[in-house]
Image: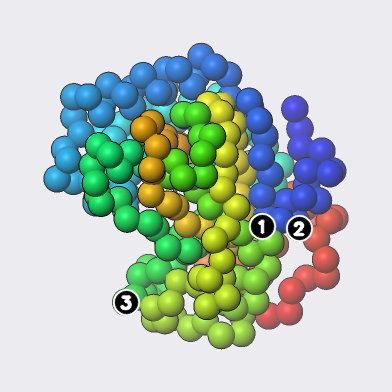
Amino acid sequence: MALTTAEKSDFVRHGLVIRRGAVASGLVARARALVDDWCRKSMDPSLINSYTQRSFAPELGSHPDLLGLFAHSGAATLASELVGEFEPVSTIQIQIRIPESQLPNAQPEKAMHVDGVACPHLDPDELRTFSLLVGVVLSDITDPDGGALRYQPGGHLTMSEWFRDQWFLGITDQVPPEVDGRTGTPFLGAPGDVLLMHHLVPHAVGRNRTQEPRVMAYFRVSNVSHADRRLQALQDPWLDYPGLADLYPAKAPL
Ligand SMILES: O=C(O)CCC(=O)C(=O)O
């Protein structure tokens, strides 16, 4: 079902929309089976840090049954309603938060950040930004202490202001201090729930103090013009969002 005007308005205000049960259970089950199989047979505990920074199951990054979570679930259509025409989405990121009881201290908290701008040696060509993060829940996430993603509703507006007024290329702070100091809202959900989140919404991830792994699939969606204007898209939160042109407030001054 298409995004409603209320959902689009929510997105403008909070920087995200959550669609419960948007991905069919068959697609979720196939994806989860692939990930579980990889965990049993191929996961190398000495590489947990690298998986946590990049992706678990990197060998499956382009597997059609995983890409199907985005391409065949309606999520791609929802994304296009926000960002218009987008670059092909050819990779998936799997993020698992493993219970602390199974691998103590292997996954410290991920601090508040937005994706793609945190490298200290950055030059504009090295920005790894995009327009929209699409997350698909692959495990039950009922406990905020279960390694939940924690996001800051409305933080896309704070961050674009910061990028306009204070940030410069090469700065090593990931977010301004007031954003760093907030805990964020835990994203709880059930398999098949979908999160559509603006690229400028700051987020963090906690340790998993429960007994069950938390499993998420993420897709990064870029408006077709994004790569040519990465810096501007950090400063103007609506540049990549033609689908919201009627709803957002006056264009942010650059
Ligand atoms: O584990 C998660 O849910 C999100 C991970 C994350 O923020 C990242 O990879 O940048």
**Residue 138: percent from the left, percent from the top?**
47, 29
- For disc 1, the marked residue is 153
**Residue 83: percent from the left, percent from the top?**
66, 49
Q: Is residue 205 above or below residue 208?
A: below
Q: Amino acid at mark 1?
A: Pro
- For disc 2, the marked residue is 13
Q: Is residue 217 above or below residue 13?
A: above
Residue 221 visible: no
Instruction: Evaluate if marks 1 and 2 touch, with contact meaning CB atoms under 8 Å apart.
Output: yes
Instruction: Determine the CA span between mark 1 and mark 2.
Output: 8 Å
Instruction: Evaluate if marks 3 and 1 touch, with contact meaning CB atoms under 8 Å apart.
Output: no
- For disc 3, the marked residue is 121
Circle 1: is it few (<14), some (14-19), or many (20+) Cα within 10 Å? many
**Residue 163: percent from the left, percent from the top?**
57, 77
Quick check: is the Cβ at mark 2 less than 8 Å away from ligand 1?
no
Q: Is residue 118 above or below residue 219?
A: below
**Residue 112: percent from the left, percent from the top?**
48, 63
**Which mark is nearer the camera, 3 or 1?**
1
Quick check: is the Cβ at mark 3 less than 8 Å away from ligand 1?
no
For this orientation, the residue located farthest to the top is: 26
Instruction: Determine the CA span between mark 3 and mark 1.
Output: 29 Å
Residue drawn at (26%, 27%), measured in percent from left and top? 38
